[in-house]
Each structure stands twice: as C-alpha cells, then as structure tokens.
Image: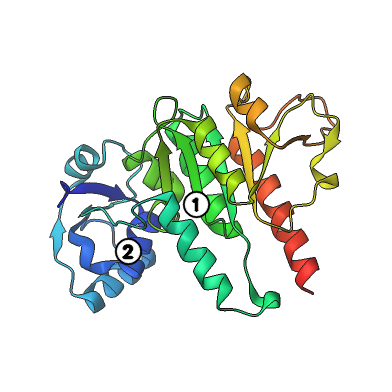
Amino acid sequence: MSSPKVVFGFHAVGVRLKTAPQSILEIYFEPTRRDARMRSFLEKVAQYGVKLVEADGLRLSKLAGSHAHQGVAARVQAVQLRTSLDELLEDLEARNAALPPAQRTPPLLLVLDGVTDPHNLGACLRVADGAGAHAVIAPKDHAAGINATVAKVASGAADTVPYFMVTNLARTLNELKERNIWVIGTSDAAPQSLYQADLKGAVALVLGAEGEGMRQLTAKTCDALVHIPMRGAVESLNVSVASGVCLYEALRQRQVHIA
C-alpha cells in the first residue's frame, strides 16, 4: 500500500468522503471555526464514522503545506482509479459494446503537453470532471504530478478523473489513433476553428502549456489542429480555460447529436 498523503479544503476532503470514505485515515479540523459550513461538514464526517482530530491553524498549514486549508485537512490513502490507460479504454469499449448505439459514450480524453504548474493541472482536472472526460494524460518528464495543491485546486476531481503520466507521449497518441480515437491538437496557427471540428466521436483533445504550446513532435502526431477563436486583445487563454472551452464544445456536440 502506498504511503498516506494529505488532501485539504472543504471540496477536496468532501469529495473524498463521498467517493472513498474507506481511504480516509483521519480528518483534522480547526475547532475554533464554528460557522455553518464547518458544522455541516463535521455532521457529514460523523455519518461516515471517520476519525476526527482537532488541530490549530499552524498544524493544519504544516500538514497541507499551504495556508489555504480552510480549517480542514485529511490524511488519506491513494485511490486507484485505473491501473492503466489501456485498461480504462478496454473497459469503456466493453461497456459501450453492451449498450445500444444511442446510449454509447465515445472516449473523451484530455491530453496536456508541458503543463507543469500544479494550479493549472488541478483546474484542468476539475473541468475534465465537469465535462465528463474519461481521463487526463500527460508525459512523465514534462508535467506536474498529483500533490496536495493539485488536489485542493481540483476540488475533488483528482479522486474522480484518472490521470495517466506516460513515458512517451507521441507513442501514446499513436496508440490512441490505432484505437480509432481522433487526436485533435490546439494551435493558434491552425486554419480550422474548434467549432468547425467534429468532436462527436472518440476524441483526444491535446493542449500545450500557455505561451509555449505543444511540443513540435506532439503537434506533428495529431490528426488535426484547431484554434480557439480570440476576439479580444489577448492572444491566448490559460490552459485550464482552453481545456474547458474544448471539452464543453465536445460535450455540446455530443448532446446535440444524441438529441
């Protein structure tokens, strides 16, 4: 079993309590905070029978590695969402095969190339969860890993969205293409708009870090490149905002298609 880690903040701890209470070793809370939000939170904890430990703000800050703990932190065991990307895709394929065509859900993946800021990663995981993406993929050597800051910003999505760090991103993208998953990258220089792309089928949306964008090999591996229309003075969007725009456009097209 892996070593315990710490998640903090009402959203992150609350989602872990809801989705995997058995993984929580103990929850630390600041007893001097007695507002309605804390009272409601402690009532939920009591329902699950999780051990509660009183801790002052200093101890919570040390546990969380941040002052943004909101008076709540938890020591937890890691939750294994899927052992591999292949396993996730095979499970999804098997599930779809058992459903009538109108009820099938084609894979929707978010690929991040060069996103090293944990705040950006956390926000990307949160929007991926909201849009129903099946997984987020990133290269091992050029990306942020899951830590307490990521979990806090993700507001619980770090426990619900599988995050796969792969050794060779270009090879992984080619393997996705072999599974008939259309790989679409974003680039300011792309002639085609995001809104001209067909995102109703199996798709992996690839975004690079703000400013630098995707690496050249990653861009070359994509089946197509699209741009997000920019009508104002700024030239680009934060990667988490761009992820939201792309994922929710895919969701919109799929809902229209189903309707």
Q: Does any portion of residue 156 appear in the rendered image?
A: no
Label 1 packing within 10 angstroms: few (<14), some (14-19), many (20+): many
Say if 195 sits above or below 12 in the image: above
Q: Position of residue 182 (x, y in %)?
A: 68, 46
Taking the spot 65% from the left edge, 55% from the top edge, the residue there is 202
Quadrant position of residue 193: top right
Which one is in front in this view, the residue at disc 2 or the one at disc 1? 1
Instruction: Tell me if 97 is positioned left or right of 158 in this view.
Output: right
Q: Mark 2 and mark 1: span between their CA atoms?
A: 32 Å
**Which of marks 1 and 2 precedes in the sequence?**
2
- Kind of residue at disc 1: Ala
Say if 254 sits above or below 75 in the image: below
Instruction: Tell me if 127 is positioned left or right of 83 in this view.
Output: right
The one of 118 and 247 positioned closer to us in this rendering:
247
Residue position marked by numbered label 2 in the rendering: 38
Q: Position of residue 258 (x, y in %)?
A: 76, 72
Residue position marked by numbered label 1 in the rendering: 135
Instruction: Indicate the secondary structure of the residue bearing disc 2.
Output: helix
Q: Residue 144: which numbered mark, if any?
A: none
Taking the spot 77% from the left edge, 36% from the top edge, the residue there is 226
